[in-house]
Amino acid sequence: MSTMTELSGGPALPQERRIVTAIPGPKSQELMARKEAAVASGVGTVMPVFARRAGGGVLEDVDGNSFIDFGSGIAVTSVGNSAEAVVRRATAQLEAFTHSCVMVTPYEPYVEVCEQLAGLTPGDHAKKSALFNSGAEAVENAVKIARVYTKRQAVVVFDHGYHGRTNLTMALTSKSMPYKHGFGPFAPEVYRVPVAYPYRWLTGPENCAEEAADQAIDQISKQVGAGNVAAIVIEPLLGEGGFIEPAKGFLPRIAEFAKTHGIVFVADEIQSGFCRTGQWFACEDEGIVPDLITTAKGIAGGLPLAAVTGRAEIMDAAHSGGLGGTYGGNPVACAAALGSIETMRELDLPARAKRIEEIMKPRLQKMAEQHGVIGEVRGRGAMLAIELVKPGTKEPNPEATAALAKACHQEGLLVLTTGTYGNVMRFLPPLVIGEDLLNEGVDIVEAALSRL
Ligand SMILES: *Cc1c(COP(=O)(O)O)cnc(C)c1O
């Protein structure tokens, strides 16, 4: 366990699970009453405990409970919370200056993040980047850039896709409740096509990649017209849709189709990127080189930063002043990103993600053999999930998923659910989590599953 604190480099927070009150405890309950009075109800909460400190593989609440963290604030704190290099660099930047606005007077950390992105993202072509505040903003800008470059308007997205909560990204997002319900009308010129979801492909997983690609390409060609499409936007490993790994062969076919027709292929790696899946970026697994890649979440160790990175000639298509925003690429967030990238390199976090898969996946697979409620185990690296069904069928089982999550929370394990059908439990531990803690977390899932 001491190795953990070393790995996280974060504050000396005991790397242990510790439950000392009912969940939620009295202080969290008090704060929750204040939240209900002051915070809009639309801002929901997975777990009704208030955070006090976090680091390594744990999150401590205001009542002194310490939870094993299998959520990383939704795949954000991959380097751990308050990672040493993130805090050191962000603190120095805070003391130097907090903001000048890159559109007014630029600063070095912004440029350095873009240089790092050019080196880390797939492909050895000339690349440029633009920085923003949130993932949704990055996706919006990727679409703006693709449109101005191609002089076309249509955008193609996929079933089960998630791209954000702004008006355009709601349109790009597949699931109605809770993301879109009641919030329309949505942006036009957005077209949705099938994705190769092997577990739920009607004719079975064997020909899923080919059939799904055929259908997607046919729909784009016949219903939209390939020559009208500015961008195809896809998550190489779908996050909010349920940690769906498109069947091998699907992504290369779509990327090839895009290339043939002059369509900008955009990989949305906001959740799957920055070492999460055992590579720097998930699309590397099939050798995909996207024209543009959007990143956020894991990029800056918890500070708000997002980026669009891609082929220089595409990125340069927008006129001067056409891209930007008051805070996009804030210097403190950039400094944090540089600290985060430094940590990823130093600790070889892609390898850590693979090690997490090595430990967790066989254990989850064993559970699936014993419990009919687990329909499938999937994911890569430290982006793993179980899909829950009614035993003996493939019928989604969101009730069991919610019950399992709640049972884990009560035992001191922070887990999240996801999926179009709300029936996927996802595991996104910080990549610096200790192996003892990781195994203890899986023990909790196993025990909760047996009691279900
Ligand atoms: C989270 C997410 C987004 C949106 O990012 P925000 O920072 O919440 O705006 C977009 N795409 C994917 C794949 C995501 O997981």
Image: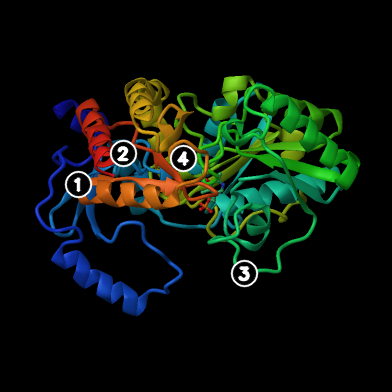
- CA gap between label 2 and label 1 equals 21 Å
Specify the label residue 134 is tagged with: none
Quadrant of the drawing holding the N terminus: top left
Residue 438 located left or right of residue 297 = left
- Circle 1 SS class: loop
- Circle 3 SS class: loop
Residue neighbourhood size for the residue with mark 4, other residues' Cα within 10 Å, grouped as few (<14), some (14–19), many (≥20):
many
Residue under pointer 2: 80
Badge 2 or badge 3: first in the primary sequence: 2
- CA gap between label 1 and label 3 equals 36 Å
Here the colouring is rainbow
Residue neighbourhood size for the residue with mark 1, other residues' Cα within 10 Å, grouped as few (<14), some (14–19), many (≥20):
many
- Circle 4 SS class: helix
Residue neighbourhood size for the residue with mark 2, other residues' Cα within 10 Å, grouped as few (<14), some (14–19), many (≥20):
many
Please state the horizontal and vertical placement of residue 249, each as a whole percent of the image.
Answer: 68, 22
Residue under pointer 4: 299
Residue under pointer 3: 183
Badge 2 or badge 4: first in the primary sequence: 2
